[in-house]
Image: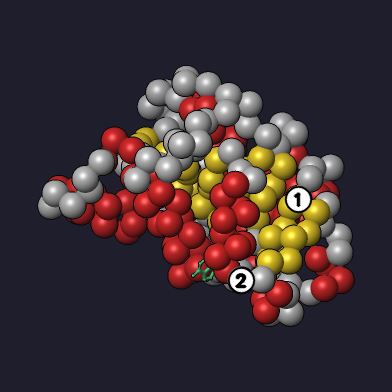
Amino acid sequence: MNTPSARISSICVYCGSQPGHDPAFRQAAEILGRSMAGQGIGLVYGGGTRGLMGAVAEAVLSHGGKVTGIIPEFLMDKEASRQELGQLSELHVTADMHERKHMMFERSDAFVTLPGGIGTLEEIVEIMTWAQLGRHVKPMVLANINGFWDPLSALIGHMREAGFIHTGHLVRPLVIESAEQIVPAIQAAATGNGEDETIISKM
Ligand code: AMP
């Protein structure tokens, strides 16, 4: 099993390849990126240069941080531009989605999910299933910007009440309402000081 590392050096951010309608989503991506760069924490992400994916990567880079993009060959022209991909600190072009997801997982000390679509949902659900199966204990955050992830929290609560979350103690993503609090909450969780309920709620 992967154990949490007390020192968080990289965070994987899952988020929409679209910007979404609410300007608060892009602002959250920018705040998160700036805050990661300020703490010397590298970004691992899917390499897209559009939507919220592009916003978080640009924020990390423009504040002097390191960005690792991991993208399958077939998505290079769809989710990115080759010229913009050239600006990333590190770029990995994978053969397929499976290799991409595995590399993103391996290279990250924690996972944050900003608002996004079906791809984003798939990515965080897979990370939660691996936690449930005891494959990792890395911190997981739902960035609940303007309540975006409330429906997912409600669905998981419903599954729990109905008796279908079999190892529920392993599936406790931190639900964080403000982008400024994400990095401090992850650092606190990694050092075992993550019980401050004023900033964190657990699903
Ligand atoms: P979306 O939230 O749909 O805009 O997608 C965000 C990111 O998730 C994009 O980089 C997609 O390539 C990626 N993605 C889409 N489908 C999947 C999937 N089945 N597994 C993992 N990532 C995916």
Picture quarter containing residue 64?
top right
Q: Residues within 10 Å of mark 2 (few under 14, many from 20)?
A: few
Picture quarter containing residue 19?
bottom right
Disc 1 marks a residue whose amino acid type is Val
Q: Which residue is mark 1?
A: 67
Question: 21 left or right of 200?
Answer: right
Question: 87 or 145, which lies in front?
Answer: 87
What x and y, as percent, mark residue 39? 71, 32
Per the rendering, the mark at residue 84 is none
Q: Residue at x 86, y 60 (%)?
A: 87
Look at the numbered disc 2 and give the secondary structure of its residue.
loop
- Image-quarter location of ligand 1: bottom right
Tell me the quadrant of the picture where the C terminus can be found. top left
Question: 30 left or right of 122?
Answer: right
Q: Residue at x 57, y 28 (%)?
A: 5
Look at the numbered disc 1 and give the secondary structure of its residue.
strand
Q: Does residue 195 appear anywhere in the picture?
A: yes
What x and y, as percent, mark residue 121? 44, 62
Q: Nearer the viewer, mark 1 or mark 2?
A: 2
Sequence-first tag of 1 and 2: 1
Q: Does residue 27 appear anywhere in the picture?
A: no
Q: Residues within 10 Å of mark 1 (few under 14, many from 20)?
A: many
Q: Which residue is mark 2?
A: 96
Question: Where 79 falls versus 88 (above or below)?
Answer: below
